[in-house]
Amino acid sequence: MPVSAETVPAADQVRARRLAAPSKAAGGPPALEARGICKSYGSRNVLEGRSLTVAAGEAVAIIGENGAGKSTLMRICAGLITPDAGSVSVTGRVGYCPQEPGLFDLLSADEHLEMFAPALGLSREQAVREGHRLLAEFAFPLAQRAQCRHLSGGSRQKLNLALALLGGARILLLDEPYQGFDHGAYVSFWEHVARWRGEGIGVVVVTHLLADQALVDRVVELEIVPDPAGGQR
Amino acid sequence: MSARRILVTAKLTGLELARRRIALGLLTALPLAFYGGSVGRGGNAVITGGVAMAFSIAGASIFVALTARPVDPRLILAGYHPTELLLGRLLLLELFGILVAAVFSVVMVFGSDPAHPWAVAAGVGLVALTSVPFGLAVGGLSPHELEGVLVLIGVVGVQLTLYSTQLVAKFLPFWGGQRLLDHSVNANVAVGAAVPANILYAAALFAIATYIMRRQAPRVGGAARQRPDAVAGIHAV
């Protein structure tokens, strides 16, 4: 798909490109709006006045070099860390899939679903049923009933993703969600992104893959904040 | 606050803990070894074994806290309140502590024939009571298991080297239990304020664990979770 440039305030230091074809629900109220986000770790500025708006039903890819603050921005948008300045507002529940699967090694997939169930207002049976449906769509080895420590990296990531999707999120923040996926699961993932867009769910995907950028409505590139001392980090 | 969330947390914490069979076996064997090693030295064995029991229960609590750390932010983001997670773990670990304390009481009462068997049971009960919030607080503060275990070894080790009548011992978390264990074998040692002091210490440690957990928790507005279709508003400034 062709890509056209979109101007974003220079102060945001964010370069964005929008696909020619808007998503079904683009133009609606934003599912996510982050404004003027600043974050530093010690003397190192990671984010400086970044902004990001995602409409309901819009898929956005975030790209950038290592250390550009992609994961930090996602964690701030999810509410996991507090920015030094700026604000984030979200509509509805946030589904967050971290880069590193945050799982209990000694619990099985079903037990994870049971753990998340009461938080999401679901019964155990509802959570397991919905979780199994999601996991089956990504070809997760449900029959194994294995503890997480015995799962492959890709299977752990599938469970990680299913937990983010459980309970019907309105905005999905997916930080390199398909690490370790095989080709079939990867293709299936992007088919799901298209479906979520159609359902009016905002989707943000951190990615390094050039091919992915043709599969979203918009690409936001984060740049490394220059060191005020002029040196390279 | 939801009772179901607390109970589910307790249940799954129990499942996870039960699967750490080797670690649990070693943790339980350690204080038994302390007791067994000093059983020929009169009443000291009861005090040593009872206080060393903190290794088992606080060690298990540290493991639980550290294992949950990468998952907790997501659970809180999904809708758990940090205190619900902590209370669920406290519930399960205290039950585990009571079980271990009961076993230790029986072993030491029959093994050492103390003058006041009730004080042995009460002493190890107090050690168990304090060990859980101590482990949860240390687990909340420690970056890794190694640091947490070193703090545990340090605190329990110092407590073991002191007499319960020494001033410094009174400032350590397991003094109340130690004092009761001391009383069980030495009638000259008064119980004094051991019980209320120990309960206060346990409550303070739990308050610290709660504070740490809440500080580390994501700051997402609860309204977003309870009203899925509503605008949640600014959740981070």
Image: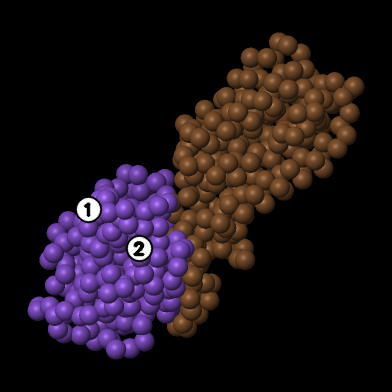
Question: Which residue corresponds to mark 1?
Answer: A180
Characterize the local packing of mark 1: few (<14), some (14-19) or many (20 or more) Cα atoms within 10 angstroms. some
| Residue closer to the observer: B73 or B234 | B234
Q: Amino acid at mark 1?
A: Gly
Q: Nearer the viewer, residue A203 or B121?
A: A203
Tint applied to chain A in the drawing: purple
- Quadrant of the image occupied by residue A170: bottom left
Mark 2 crowd level (few <14, some 14–19, many ≥20, 10 Å Cα): many
Which chain contains the residue that carries disc 2? A
The residue at 46%/39% (across/down) is: B144
For label 1, the SS is loop
Please identify which colour was used for chain B in the image.
brown
Label count reads 2
Q: Residue A126 at x, y = what percent?
A: 43, 69
Which mark, residue B96? none
Q: Is residue A120 left or right of residue A172?
A: right
| Residue B174 locus on image (x, y percent) | 71, 34
Residue A129 is at least partly visible in this image: no
Q: Position of residue A3 (x, y in %)?
A: 12, 78
Q: Is residue B42 visible?
A: yes
Residue found 48% across the figure and 76% down from its top: B234
Q: Earlier in the sequence, mark 1 or mark 2?
A: 2
Residue type indicated by callout 2: Leu
**Chain of the residue under the numbered disc 1 shown in the image:** A
Please, is residue B131 above or below residue A195 in the view? above
Which corner quadrant of the image does residue A134 belong to?
Answer: bottom left
How did the renderer colour the structure? by chain
Q: Which disc number belongs to residue A47? A: 2
Q: Residue at x 53, y 33 (%)?
A: B149
